[in-house]
């Protein structure tokens, strides 16, 4: 399971025992307590409002100790498992408990309450669908075609339009292994970061000399679709003597309006989600995925992430300088270069939304 927030909506996503993905508002139906935080494995959701937190803490600490000293588990075996089960039952006995399907499975001390129907007190669902490696949520509470939204073809049409096939053929699929997450808080408006991503590689040979050496910038191309722009570029370098090649023979950079990017290159894919934090601050969340045959190659992963980090640091300097420049009384407006088609496409979509909101 994983818990996140979008605006003022707290939500959680989980997969039940049958493998079905669910999403819910992360709010207990009793006293509106937040149910879960972070991510991990759970067999159910227990509201912390009426849980003995000291008992829960004791359970966590005991688990940590046992993990560190595995000989206890090896010696006592079944007794240790029964001990953990007993502690867990004590914890679960106290709080409102929900199954992974969202249904209320236990409400302590509610027996005999008039007009209390447990089937009506489950977690409030959010429309959810899966496309490739991505889990998508539809926060529109008025959605009538909830089951239709779960259909892969409908998701591809609504979210990606005609770019879905291009992305699938470009290696954006669920075969990749998740590696890690990196987050950056940047002193610039969220749109500044998007603009930097969408300039058709204009700044790459000047600001990212290391990256540019691995790309054939003369092959750079940009394709605009409904709400997606795709920038593609051939690889300009080959694997060295040690076999290291992060970028591969082709790189694909997809911008999905308004604030999501998918980057597929070599054996890697990373995604960037840009979250506004104010008029001059944003957070960018990077998630890294890798082809499975390399997921145990720690040296390759570490070296690749170091190179990616260097590119991000270079971009952060650019974006923060642009933000400062935008606030200068000397700047009024700029002009688009011919290669900045994707940026213009983004601005047109944004202008349409703002003028019709």
Image (tube, rainbow, N blue to C red):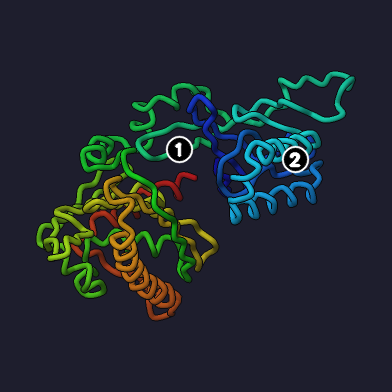
- Using the rendered view, name the quadrant where residue 170 is placed: top left
Q: Residue at x 75, y 22 (%)?
A: 118
User: How far across and how far down the image is residue 243, in percent?
Assistant: 16, 60
Report the residue that reaches farthest toward the front.
75
| Residue position for label 2 | 87
- Relative side of 226 to 250, left or right: right
Q: Residue at x 48, y 71 (%)?
A: 187
Query: Which is nearer the eye, 245 or 58?
Result: 58
Q: Residue at x 32, y 43 (%)?
A: 176
Residue 347 lies, with reference to residue 51, above or below; the image says: below
Query: Which is nearer the eye, 93 or 122?
Result: 93
Query: Which is nearer the eye, 107 or 284?
Result: 107
SS class, disc 2: helix
User: How far across and how far down the image is residue 169, in percent?
Assistant: 21, 38
Residue 207 in view of the camera: yes
Residue 9 in view of the camera: no
> Crowdedness of circle 1 by 10 Å Cα count: few (<14), some, many (20+)?
some
Mark 2 to mark 1 CA distance (whole Å): 36 Å
> Crowdedness of circle 2 by 10 Å Cα count: few (<14), some, many (20+)?
some
| Residue position for label 1 | 136
User: How far across and how far down the image is residue 305, in percent?
Assistant: 34, 63
């Amino acid at each position: 399971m994983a818990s996140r927030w979008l605006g003022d909506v707290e939500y959680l996503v989980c997969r039940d025992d049958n493998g079905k993905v669910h999403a819910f508002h992360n709010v207990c139906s009793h006293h509106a307590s937040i149910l879960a935080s972070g991510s991990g494995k759970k067999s159910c959701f227990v509201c912390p409002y009426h849980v003995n937190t000291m008992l829960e803490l004791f359970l966590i600490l005991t688990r940590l100790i046992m993990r560190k000293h595995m000989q206890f588990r090896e010696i006592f075996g079944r007794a240790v498992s029964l001990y953990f089960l007993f502690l867990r039952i004590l914890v679960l006995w106290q709080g409102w408990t929900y199954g992974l399907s969202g249904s209320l499975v236990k409400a302590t001390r509610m027996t005999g309450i008039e007009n209390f129907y447990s089937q009506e007190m489950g977690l409030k669902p959010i429309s959810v669908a899966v496309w490739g490696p991505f889990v998508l949520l539809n926060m529109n509470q008025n959605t009538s075609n909830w089951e239709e939204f779960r259909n892969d073809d409908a998701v591809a049409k609504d979210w990606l339009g005609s770019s879905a096939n291009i992305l699938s053929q470009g290696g954006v699929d669920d075969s990749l292994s998740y590696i890690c997450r990196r987050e950056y808080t940047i002193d610039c408006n969220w749109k500044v970061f998007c603009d930097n991503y969408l300039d058709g590689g204009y700044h790459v040979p000047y600001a990212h000399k290391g990256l540019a050496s691995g790309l054939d910038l003369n092959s750079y191309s940009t394709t605009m679709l409904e709400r997606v722009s795709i920038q593609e570029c051939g690889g300009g370098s080959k694997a060295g003597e040690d076999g290291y090649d992060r970028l591969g023979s082709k790189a694909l950079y997809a911008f999905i309006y308004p604030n999501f990017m998918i980057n597929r290159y070599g054996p890697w894919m990373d995604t960037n989600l840009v979250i506004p934090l104010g008029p001059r601050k944003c957070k960018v969340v990077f998630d890294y995925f890798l082809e499975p045959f390399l997921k145990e190659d720690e040296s390759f992963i570490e070296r690749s992430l170091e190179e990616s980090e260097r590119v991000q640091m270079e971009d952060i300097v650019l974006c923060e300088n642009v933000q400062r420049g935008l606030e200068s009384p000397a700047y009024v407006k700029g002009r688009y270069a011919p290669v900045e088609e994707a940026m213009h496409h983004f601005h047109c979509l944004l202008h349409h939304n703002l003028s019709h909101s």
